[in-house]
Image (cartoon, helix red, strand yellow):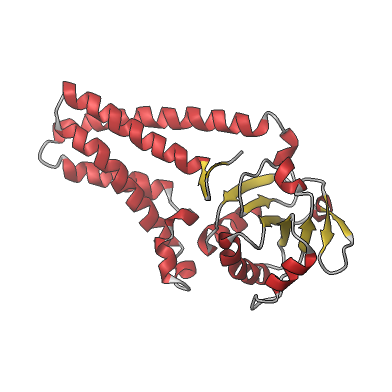
Amino acid sequence: MDAVKLGPFLLPLGRLLVLLVLVILGLVADLLARRVDKRLSAWGWNVGIAGLAAARIGFVLTHFSDYSRDLLGIFYVWQGGFSVWWGILGGAVYSLWFFRRERRLLRFTLVPPAVAGLVWLGANAVVAHLQTAPRAESASLPALTLYRIEDGSSVDLGSFKGRPVVLNVWATWCPPCRREMPMMAEVAQQNPGVVFVFADQGEGPETVRAFLNTLPQKLSNVLLDPQQAVSRTQQIVGFPTTFFYDASGKRVGIQTGEVSRAVLSDYLRRIQ
């Protein structure tokens, strides 16, 4: 499981862990503030916000060619797109500015991030174990039988092994799926060396064809999964969910929820 579903909303575990780490950072800073200097409390809660802002700004700047196609996408933070190193740099700059008149307190600012970092590493290890322990085969391209929308012929997903694969799991009733699909189709046409597979979950061919006819680009490798085998075996909690596999069939990453062009470009670089 890579996300928690609350009603119609998907909360990726990675982002929940970020929130946990920021809370831990603030609480540890509060404890230090009681013992050392009360200003550490305000710093502890604000440095996380500064780091997040810097992480987003840095990611956008390094992927501006992608965001230039749709500048509003800069503000779609739910699609992901944060740079860890820019975030660390932003937090460090904010700390230097905040304690510019009290440099002696800077040494205490190392403690909350260190504790938060240990919590991050431990929580990630637990999540990774929970994701892989019950179903080790989920880390590879699944050998499942789906059906081509054109003629209903069967296709084994495992047959795509040998080339990088992007497996998008979706449904026509899902607004984020519909929203990201034109961009996904365009990127698929621009990257012929990568196999893009679109596995519709639980819908009939007529429903799927009606939606595909609304797209400006032709979509290849649209497969029907009437029994939702992909969702069941890969423990998917909501749509869209996109898996990224390298040429050996090893899963390199997962994007839970809508993906931006910039984040998709990052994943493509990792699997090629």
Q: Nearer the viewer, residue 201 or 141?
A: 201
Residue 160: x %, y % from top left: 80, 55
Q: Relative to 184, is 128 above or below?
A: above
Quarter of the image holding residue 131?
Answer: top right
In the picture provided, is 134 more to the left or to the right than 99? right
In the picture provided, is 246 more to the left or to the right than 97? right
Q: Is residue 113 at all visible to an observer of this figure?
A: no
Q: Is residue 181 at all visible to an observer of this figure?
A: yes
In the picture provided, is 5 more to the left or to the right than 17? right
The C terminus - image quarter:
bottom right
Quarter of the image holding residue 180?
Answer: bottom right
Residue 268: x %, y % from top left: 62, 58
Q: Relative to 23, is 97 above or below?
A: below
The N terminus - image quarter:
top right
Look at 68% across and 71% down and name the residue there: 211
Residue 45: x %, y % from top left: 26, 38
Q: Residue farthest to the left? A: 101
Look at 70% across and 40% down and name the residue there: 139
